[in-house]
Image: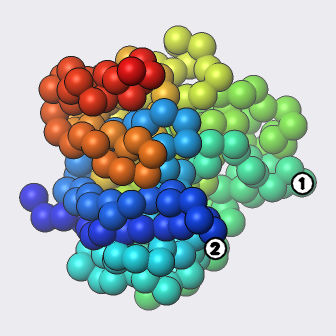
């Protein structure tokens, strides 16, 4: 497999605070990667540097061989790099269907092959059905449950037609059965060819989903490998137990 994402010696500071210290990471095409670490470990900062929300002062980020440094977030999304957010932020005045249409109009249709109006309608319906919100297509976010909001957030990310999706705590605050629903959805997306990085604190979900596990602590990568081996790593155990 070829690397779809390459992070090389990425560093980020906030004043005198080192948030990321020379992070190296390669994600293979089609891979399911779990990214974990205690609160404040640098996970969100790394994702923000990958997606273009933040600018890394050191190192480089490459996506499908193209260097992304200096490229704004919306252009990275148009290249096929999308994310969902830990706190869903839909357009509250729009329906579920209208929320999903936005990335189709402003990301997918900004590429070479534009969708027709009928094509947008079909793709929107397909995505809403994929996440199980077909009965709520005309509902507004205020009328959705928490798990429905998570599903809408994933549908909006998928509407950008990504090659790589970063799912940032897509299961936070959900019940066991709801977590299973989101896991099944992410696995379906992966089966469709989408490479996925999962950031999650729910270890049972991470372990069942991930083919590889990466651990950040205090802005450093301390482990990278098979999940069962990583969770037995003494440095990882110490980081989580405070030893």
Between 127 and 3, the one nearer to me in the picture:
3
Task: Say which residue appears at 56% left-offset and 19% top-offset.
Answer: 178
Q: Position of residue 235 (x, y in %)?
A: 27, 30
Question: What's the mark number on residue 29?
Answer: none
Please state, as top left, top right, bottom left or bottom right, where the C terminus lies in the image.
top left
Question: What's the mark number on residue 93?
Answer: 1
- Left or right relative to 130: residue 31: left
Residue 226 versus residue 194 in the image, above or below: above
Between 58 and 124, the one nearer to me in the picture:
58
Task: Say which residue appears at 24% left-offset and 79% top-offset.
Answer: 65
Between 38 and 131, the one nearer to me in the picture:
38
Q: Position of residue 166 (x, y in %)?
A: 45, 52
Q: CA distance from mark 2 to mark 1?
A: 17 Å
User: Quadrant of the rendered structure where residue 113 is?
Assistant: bottom left
- Left or right relative to 141: residue 196: left
User: Quadrant of the rendered structure where residue 234 is?
Assistant: top left
Residue occupied by mark 2: 105
Q: Position of residue 173 (x, y in %)?
A: 65, 23
| Res 99 visible | yes
Count the numbered circles shown. 2
């Amino acid at each position: 497999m070829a690397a779809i994402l390459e992070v090389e010696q990425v560093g980020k500071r906030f004043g005198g605070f080192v948030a990321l210290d020379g992070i190296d990471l390669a994600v293979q095409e089609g891979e399911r990667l779990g990214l974990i670490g205690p609160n404040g470990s640098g996970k969100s900062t790394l994702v923000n540097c990958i997606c273009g929300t933040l600018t890394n002062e050191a190192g480089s980020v490459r996506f499908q061989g193209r260097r992304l440094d200096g490229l704004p977030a919306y252009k990275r999304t148009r290249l096929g790099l999308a994310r969902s957010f830990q706190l869903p932020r839909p357009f509250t005045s729009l329906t579920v269907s209208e929320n999903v249409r936005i990335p189709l109009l402003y990301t997918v249709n900004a590429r070479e092959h534009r969708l027709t109006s009928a094509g947008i309608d079909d793709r929107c319906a397909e995505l809403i059905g994929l996440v199980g919100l077909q009965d709520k297509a005309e509902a507004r976010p205020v009328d959705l449950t928490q798990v429905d909001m998570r599903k809408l957030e994933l549908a909006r990310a998928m509407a950008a037609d990504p090659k790589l999706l970063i799912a940032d705590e897509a299961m936070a605050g959900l019940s066991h059965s709801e977590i299973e629903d989101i896991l099944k959805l992410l696995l379906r997306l992966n089966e469709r060819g989408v490479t996925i990085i999962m950031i999650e604190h729910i270890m049972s979900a991470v372990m069942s989903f991930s083919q590889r596990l990466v651990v950040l602590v205090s802005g450093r990568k301390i482990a990278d490998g098979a999940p069962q081996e990583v969770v037995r790593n003494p440095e990882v155990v110490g980081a989580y137990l405070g030893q």
